Structures are given as structure tokens and as C-alpha cells.
Amino acid sequence: RTPHLTERLQASVWDLRLDQVAPETAALAAEKFMARSTVEVERLTKNGVRTFDARAAVVRLGLAEQRADEPTGRPCAILRLVVRHL
């Protein structure tokens, strides 16, 4: 039997659009994130608050091709990240 697609996925690619954020600011934040060995975050679940390491799954994080926010022309940073499915 062939496994379901979700069971076969090893990683996914995400583009994050950060409206009104300069690309330089987003790039600096991405560099700082990637330089850390762990980044603990808390998430509220139905069983209460859960703490997990958000950094462990991120394989790559950096600026994607940039374009101005349309139609306003205001800054818009786009980050691309590759997340390993743990």
C-alpha cells in the first residue's frame, strides 16, 4: 500500500509576506533567527500551553524575490523558508 502524501512529505517551502516591512529589516531578522541554535516558542493547544523549538525544523530562511506592495508601493518583504517535517 502506498503511504498517504502527508506521510511522505519531508519538507515544505513557504513564502511569508511581511507588509510594511523593509526587506533589509526582514533579512536581518532572518539572519538572527538562523544564527540561533534554538528558538523556543509557546503555542496554546486544547491541552494547554506547549513549548517547542521553532528553529529545529527550519532548514533555510532568507529573502525571496522582492516586489513592492501593490497598489500602494509601500515596503513589503517576502521571506522564503524551507521547513523540515519532523
Image: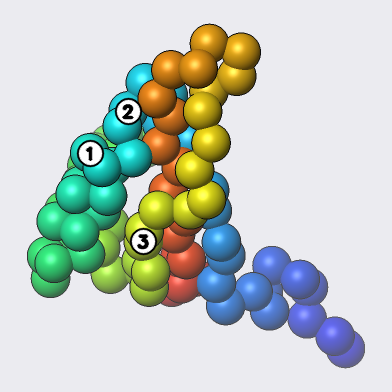
For residue 21, which numbered disc appears in the image? 2
Give the crowd class for mark 3: few <14, some 14-19, many >=20 residues within 10 Å.
many
Q: Label 1: which residue?
A: 25
CA gap, disc 3 and disc 1: 14 Å
Give the crowd class for mark 1: few <14, some 14-19, many >=20 residues within 10 Å.
few
The residue that appears at 64% across and 74% down in the rendered structure is: 9
The residue positioned farthest toward the top in the image shown: 72
Would you say the residues marked 3 and 2 are in contact, meaning their CB atoms lie under 8 Å apart?
no
Quarter of the image where one finds residue 34: bottom left
Q: Secondary structure at mark 3?
A: strand
**Between residues 26 and 71, which one lies in front from this camera angle?**
71
Q: Earlier in the sequence, mark 3 or mark 1?
A: 1
Q: Label 3: which residue?
A: 61
Q: Secondary structure at mark 1?
A: helix
**Which one is closest to the eye, mark 3 or mark 1?**
1
Q: Does residue 79 appear left or right of residue 4 in this picture? A: left
Mark 3 is on which residue type? Answer: Leu
**Between residues 86 and 1, which one lies in front from this camera angle?**
86
Say above or below: 65 vs 2.
above
